Image (spheres, helix red, strand yellow):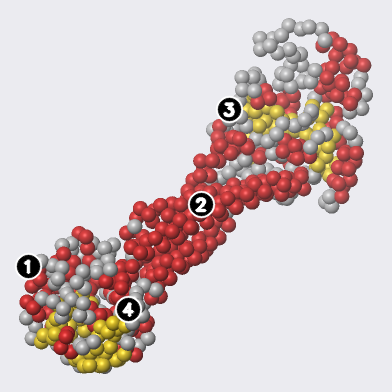
Amino acid sequence: MSLVLDNLKKSYREPGGGRIPVLNVARFELKTSEQVALIGSSGGGKTTLLNVIAGITTPDSGRVVIDNIDVTALNEPSRDRFRAMKIGFVFQTFNLLPAFTALENVLLGMCFAGKGTDSHRATDLLTRVGLGHRLHHRPPQLSVGEQQRVAVARALANHPSLLLADEPTASVDVANQNTILELIRDACKENNVSLLLVTHSPDVAARFGRIEKLSDFNQP
Amino acid sequence: MNLVTIALKSIKQRLLSSSLTALSVSLGVMLMVAVLIINSVVTELFNQKSFGFNLVVGPKGGDMSLALSAIYRLERSGEPLPYLYYKELQQHPAVEKAVPITIGDLTEEGEFPIVGTIPEYFELDYSYKKPFQVRGSFMKTPFDAVIGSRVAAKNGWDIGSEFKLTHGGVKDHVHEEKFRVVGVLKSTGTPNDRTAFVSIAGFWGISEHEKPLQEAISRLEKFRYTVPQSLRDQAEKEKQPKKPDAHGHNHADHAELLDEQKEVTAIFLRTKGDTGFAAIRLAGEINEDVRALAINPVPVMGRLMSLIVGNIRLMLMALTSLIIAVSAVSIFVSIYNSMSDRRREIGIMRALGARRETVFAIILAESALLCLGGGVIGLLLGHGLVAVASPIIESRAGILINPLTFEPAELILFPVLLIVGSLIGFLPGLAAYRTDVAAALSE
């Protein structure tokens, strides 16, 4: 099993002192290499769920188990290292660093994993997403679609076992939506990476064999 | 890719503000380096611990003034001493060597001080166990000259070159007599480098360098020397009006001067024995008399250093330290202000797996790099500033400063800058450390 969420709860403090519950997931599982589309309404806690899975946000209670490791039991530095090595993240707004070239953005992910950088692999990944000719271009010099491809290559740089994609096609045009989506799915398939893709688009979700509505398993 | 390259990328991303902050550091360091170099040269020059002589004897007056005129040739001296006084000291049982000098004129070209002396001057070490080395020879005939290395370099003179003197440094009053260079001194790092030495006999032989007999007689009387009647008669004759020559000079057809008419500006004395007691005793003896002043230049110049130069140095160092501190504050403000713009960038790095300590270290490295980069540029600019300023300092103060002089204290600047950079980066680094990743990513 690649991902297990067990009795996961997360709430945020209100300005008045109370707490707003956002997540209450009794059980959620994702098998190795499985690809799941997660749909939900805006403000429904989709991004919070991804952040909790990635160890960016700590839950109030419950467990997040990835590759049989309880991420919630790790201390913060170990969680950071685990995230760098086991989880790939593709954001809606790409989140590339503008001062770094496409190649450097991919190498940056490797750098934080502490395994050393592998320019050859980074180049290979970028070539596979169709950016072999754009290695030394910085994000502002790339189209929106190209930027998201760089983000995909970066997410795969450290051989993750789980890829979290937060509305990866929301910022790209329709023509690029399909390309990006297929790119992510194919890359995950090729590398045996489990994929949890958050979207609000039924069309995007329809391409997945397994579609989960957040409201079905999250009762905050 | 490592933390330093990431920090460099961040600096590059904000090139203008980074350049301006690094520039402010470099300006502070530039001034600091210039002050250090100039200070070290001045300290070395005026803090010379030994000379090839024990005493300098000159006219009564200030001891510092005597040292500055006789050794450093930076000041005009008081009324010269009679040559007979030099002869008297030469015969003193405590004196091993007595060397007279006359100063006052300058080279027409380059305006370097002229020192009229005898070849024995060069037998006195210019510093402790450092004898003069000359290419060519020392003065043999009255119009021979030996020039310092700086004079040779700046005026392009070499053995065989000829030059004229300006009388008392007055530009349009050039003596007719020409001196010929017979030797060029190797660099000594002392005022000798920027001095043109001429034979004292030649110096006396120049028109207008002879003291009018009546004045000479009155000076001799002050020094309690017996004035021969023949000299008084000659002085009476001199009172008779004479036809001036083409240059307005009224001299006795270059007739050889009488010893009574000769004068010396100062006398360098080396006493017998090594203990220094002889010098102290002799100085006491000379100073008890009203005729002349004897000084040991080492403590005199040491006093100048501590009273004036030392305080100026302290003030300049404090000023440049303040400039660096102001630069440090500007770097702090620049980096700290950029932190709000960089929250997302930091959030991305953290989301990619960067630890809190990593982003803290990146900000620290950025700050340290700005300081060190500014420091390196400042170091080069500092030497450049010295290169620009040295001819001005040389012409105004007569102090030679080599822009390539490396002051070991310059090395201390870099660890200091590294510490300052780390301190500056600490608070912005802490802000990066505390960044809420989820909040930063949602911005």
* Nearest to viewer (mark 3 / mark 2): 2
Same chain under badges 1 and 2? The reply is no
Between the residue at mark 1 and the residue at mark 2, the CA separation in whole angstroms equals 56 Å
Between the residue at mark 4 and the residue at mark 1, the CA separation in whole angstroms equals 41 Å
Foreground residue among B378 and B259? B378
Instruction: Find numbered disc 4 in the image and state the secondary structure of the residue it sits on.
Output: loop
Give me the chain letter of mark 1.
Answer: A
Foreground residue among B201 and B324? B324
Q: In the image, is residue B116 above or below residue A72?
A: above
Residue receiving disc 2: B28
What type is the residue that disc 4 sits on?
Glu
Q: Please give left or right for residue B405 compared with residue B314 in the image.
A: left
Between the residue at mark 2 and the residue at mark 4, the CA separation in whole angstroms equals 50 Å
Between the residue at mark 3 and the residue at mark 1, the CA separation in whole angstroms equals 83 Å
Residue receiving disc 3: B109
* Nearest to viewer (mark 4 / mark 1): 4
Residue receiving disc 4: A14
Instruction: Find numbered disc 1 in the image and state the secondary structure of the residue it sits on.
Output: helix
Q: In the image, is residue B95 above or below residue B371?
A: above
Q: Residues within 10 Å of mark 3 (few under 14, many from 20)?
A: some
Residue A119: give x, y in percent of width and height. Answer: 25, 71
* Nearest to viewer (mark 3 / mark 1): 1
Q: Which mark is residue A31?
A: none
Residue A12: give x, y in percent of width and height. Answer: 31, 81
Q: Please give left or right for residue A107 compared with residue A174 in the image.
A: right
Residue receiving disc 1: A175
Instruction: Find numbered disc 2 in the image and state the secondary structure of the residue it sits on.
Output: helix
Tell whether label 2 touches label 1 (CB within 8 Å).
Answer: no
Q: Does label 4 or label 1 sit earlier along the sequence?
A: 4
Residue B10: give x, y in percent of width and height. Answer: 34, 62
